[in-house]
Amino acid sequence: MVLEIVLAALPLLVVAVLLVGLLWPATRAMPIAWIVALGVGFFAWNMPPDWLAAASIVGVMTALEILWIVFGALVLLYTLMQAGAFDRINRGFATISDDRRVQIVLLGFFLATFIEGAAGFGTPAAVVAPLLLGLGFPALAAVIAAIIGHIIAVTYGAVGTPIIVGIQDPLASTGFQDEIAQGGYSVAGYSEQVAAWAATYHSLVGFVMPLFAVAMVVYFFGDREERSLSPAWEVAPLCLFSGIVFAIPYWLSAWFFTAEFPSLIGSMVGGAIVVSALKAGYFLPESHWDFPPRSEWPSHWVGTIEPGENGATTGGPDEATVADGGVVGSEMSLLRAWSPYVLLVVLLVITRAIDPISAFIQRPAFVIEWQEILGTGLANSIAWVNVPGFWLLVSALIAIPIFGMSGDQVSAAWREAAEKIVAPFIALVFVIAMVQVMINSAAHPGAPEAGSMIIVLAQATANALGPIYPAVAALIGALGAAMAGSNTVSNITFGGFQFEAAQQLGLPTQIIVGAQAVGGAIGNLVAIHNVVAALATVGLVGQEGRVMRLNLIPLVYYAIFVGFWALLFSYVLFPGAF
């Protein structure tokens, strides 16, 4: 059994050593990790070659779906750069505050959580990181801020997909209905309870995420000779106020409304309150904080897309160029500059919240599907219209007449986006192919009874810890999300396992499965292909290890305190819960 556990962990160990330890780029590390996963699958899990190939194909199709999002985000980014809209957006933020710490709160937290609630699928980092880059952030800092800022919203991303698809659907189809009915719930009602407990964890632990994001940026991207958290403490009142006014409507929505809208409601209500407070002069920092001069930045802070200078994005057109067939940045209204992103959010909400439209765009005519891949039982599909990448491209196309762009400007935007997509394509394909080999390692006839590599790792953790299992329930969810890059996939993979483990140990199942849903969110902090996708939008592919290493800090914080609350809920406060 020990050998089985070591072998199951081997692909992950290879990833950890090469990416985080040796700081190899994912384009080099992930093909090796995929080969290791193939070897473990073939020799230790008895996977036939056709099943290894089919599982890898499942991963390739998932990678293409993610790349569809990244490409759309890049096209929209370069469209706004060519139109001069970033210059106007930057001046718009300056009317509230040009302090980088305030911008992290407004964009990295509130905008990112709103987009996560509307779209999910890695869209927040793909949209917000380029915006921060355009405002003058180093590329690496933009990615860190965007990923950390949206984590609290991931459990309810894409209008509740991780709960509805990740918790409700698997529990309804895997034989847990009788046990749930004995507790007095329908599967749908039970899933709502899981969502509510997850919101409780997030609210108690995640309300400090605005402060965490600011602290990470000012400490690691401030003065390199005198690193200090003092600039973060200066805006702590703003950050904590922002976290609280987000968390209250967020928590109330999860408990008393629906699992689909906590992130949207929290970000809209909280964001409106904070912007109003800032405009009224409250919580504005007394001192101004900015990054060191551009000449002092290390090379790994900046990718192939230069950050903005003096409010405009380097590499984009200057005002004279924009005036030739486009909209002059200085004459553009703020609403006009933001309009493609406003349109994007509206389209994402409509296509996910309105059933007739949502059902229509998921019709088979709009889905690329492969059933029984290579004669195995594996299948995958790409809902290319439902995926946010399609609506990112629609927004970019509508932006052309909005900004009065010339053909040269449009072609330049699309050409830049196409050039930037090559490196993440290589990394993502091998990342997700490896993940799918591990997840499907027990799906073939004659597979070991112990289960897939993922299940073996999770069960070993549960068996080793016994009564203190609640302390690690979130970490198990984080493992699934770190590999698959998806809270939904993590919930599908481990939701039933967490339910069964809780029953066997006599623990409240909603509390444990709720911790799973939270773990699936925080695992996105170090999910390899989420990191690759975010880095791709700022031209920084190859720095995955650095991002993952830094993001381990908020992940450890979140996991420890969710574990603390899970223990307290399970044994002290609510031991009688179902």
Image (cartoon, rainbow, N blue to C red):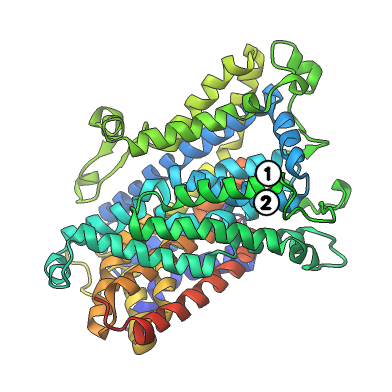
According to the picture, the residue beneath numbered tag 1 turns out to be: 132
Q: Residues within 10 Å of mark 2 (few under 14, many from 20)?
A: many
Closer-to-camera residue (470/74): 470
Q: Residue visible at 62% across and 60% down?
A: 241
Which residue is farthest front? 280
Closer-to-camera residue (340/127): 340
Q: Residue visible at 32% across and 78% down?
A: 459
Q: What amino acid is labelled 1 in the image?
A: Leu
Residue 315 left/right relative to 378: right
- Residue 87 coordinates in the image, percent (x, y): 74, 30
Closer-to-camera residue (460/311): 311
Q: Residues within 10 Å of mark 1 (few under 14, many from 20)?
A: many
According to the picture, the residue beneath numbered tag 2 turns out to be: 104
- Residue 105 coordinates in the image, percent (x, y): 65, 52
Nearer-N-terminus badge (2/1): 2
Q: Secondary structure at mark 1?
A: helix
Q: Quadrant of residue 475?
A: bottom left
Q: Quadrant of residue 194?
A: bottom left
Residue 209 in sight in this render: yes
Q: What amino acid is labelled 2 in the image?
A: Ile
Alpha-carbon distance for marks 2 and 1?
Answer: 8 Å
- Residue 470 coordinates in the image, percent (x, y): 38, 80
Q: Quadrant of the N terminus?
A: bottom left
Q: Residue visible at 39% across and 87% down?
A: 468
Whether residues under marks 2 and 1 lie with C-beta atoms below 8 angstroms apart, the answer is yes
- Residue 91 coordinates in the image, percent (x, y): 76, 34
